[in-house]
Image (cartoon, grey):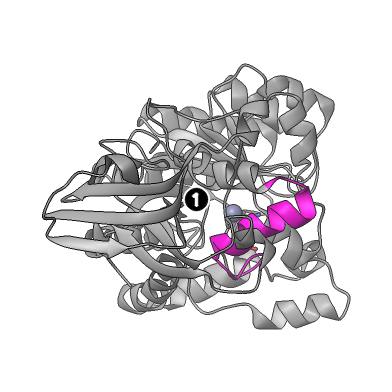
Amino acid sequence: MQTLIINIKELLQVRETHVDKVSGNEMAVLPSIKNAFLLIEDDTIAAFGSMNDCPKINADKTIEADGKIVLPSWCDSHTHIVYAGNREQEFVDRINGLTYEEIANRGGGILNSAKKLNETSEDDIYNQSKKRLEEVIQQGTGAVEIKSGYGLTVEGELKMLRVIKKLAQNYPIAIKATFLGAHAFPLEYKENHSAYIDLIINEMLPKIAEEKLADYIDAFLETGYFSVEETERIMEAGKQYGLRSKIHVNQFTAINGIAACVKHNALSVDHLEIVTDEDIEALKNSETIAVALPSCSYFISIPYTPARKMLNAGLPLALASDFNPGTTPSGNMNFVVATACIKMKMTPEEAINAATINGAYAMGLSATHGSITIGKKANLIITKPLNSFYELPYAFGSNLIEQVLLNGKVIS
Ligand SMILES: N=CN[C@@H](CCC(=O)O)C(=O)O
Ligand SMILES: [Zn+2]
């Protein structure tokens, strides 16, 4: 099956030779071809270039993209799409003056979602979660990481990971699963942290590995949650099962967690709303990518990740949604990209690099996703007619996506 997209106003993120990720100054450059074509064979990008070189073939399907921008689908490397119920009441509590920390200390927050999840059947959780997955696909996401972490019991965590597996089987989007048993301490372990970490290491991990339910391991390394030492135990244990870590860190406080994550060769460190010079030094020359979550900063009114400081230091940065019921009830990557431009002062070129190729890197998918490269998956966004791609973050509240393709097939 051949699909030919013709007369593309501008084809973005074209990488003739493979790149894993882009860093620092490189992020300011978004390679593109104006007046372009793109040829898809089955689910794969087969050729692209200027319309002057468009092959004269009778493709099975031709898509006219006059005036439209085509770019690789968003790669959302950090979500908690699988959950039960929501936390609207906490939203109102925050409006009335409570902080995220105060709500968590009253038994709300992650523990609130964990209670709901453990009371909800696997089928019900699947049905609630698939709606969110369908929504983000419509919004242009073509690869997504989904975490567990609202179970916090052996059965609850397995239940979440099985739902993620079922979503991956039933939907054409690429999904990576991350085990986040170390998201919070259940109340009964509040005074006995090591017993809960033992449960994660001795009960949860072996079962998860046996059923091959996870690709990565995560922990919430934060004051009041998992300490540096506790997170190191989790990262070590993950390694024994071949699970590389992707860690929630520096959301509210900087406690030297990033250096520990780099020491353990974490694939990503995520949040980083609070970043010290030492954290930046630790990330230099590492294979660990920083992931910023601007919708979370927006929703709970905390600082934005200091992108400019990090890019000036030559670091790579990815953008992700953090879709979850507590701090970010939205998986809209278009809003993420716009907010990164508006609030973090990233240029549109930098933000699109961060939400495509660098997002792919942050979930170990840059060999197959995140750029227009021959041999990669034909996961694409075709916009409505636009003046230029700058309109994508500029018109931040508009839906400018006309069509999305996953594995070469038009989804909407
Ligand atoms: N900070 C830790 N985890 C989630 C929020 C969890 C929740 O409040 O439910 C996050 O990435 O923001
Ligand atoms: Zn998160």
**In which quadrant of the rendered image does the C terminus lie?**
bottom left
Query: Residue 70, percent across and down?
Result: 42, 54
> Which residues lie in the magenta part?
326-347
Q: Report the side of 243 relative to 193 (left or right).
A: left
Q: Is residue 213 visible?
A: no
Left or right of 18 in this view: 30: right
- Give the quarter of the figure containing the N terminus: bottom left
Tell me where residue 405 sits by quadrant.
bottom left
Q: Nearer the viewer, residue 32 or 335?
A: 32
Q: Is residue 356 visible?
A: yes
Assess whether residue 346 is covered by the magenta stretch. yes
* Residue at disc 1, secondary structure: strand
The amino acid type found where label 1 is placed reads Gly
Q: Is residue 223 left or right of residue 65?
A: right
Residue in the picture at 35% in, 52% down: 175
Residue 286 spot, x, y in % from top left: 59, 20
Image-based side of 86 in relation to 153, left or right:
right
Q: Give the camera-side residue of 45 and 104.
A: 45
Whether residue 341 is situated above or below residue 111 in the rendered picture: above
Q: Residue at x 81, y 57 (%)?
A: 302
Question: Label 1 crowding class (10 Å Cα cut-off): few <14, some 14-19, many 20+?
Answer: many
Q: Residue furthest front?
A: 52
Based on the picture, tell me whether residue 68 belongs to the magenta stretch: no
Q: Quadrant of ligand 2?
A: bottom right
Picture residue at 62% right of the left edge, 64% below the top: 335
What is the x, y in percent for residue 114? 54, 67
Q: Nearer the viewer, residue 367 or 175?
A: 367
Disc 1 under 8 Å from ligand 1? The reply is no
- How far from the left and from the top, in percent, is residue 121? 35, 77
Q: How many marks?
A: 1
Q: Return the residue found at the far right.
A: 97
Which residue is tagged 1?
Answer: 181
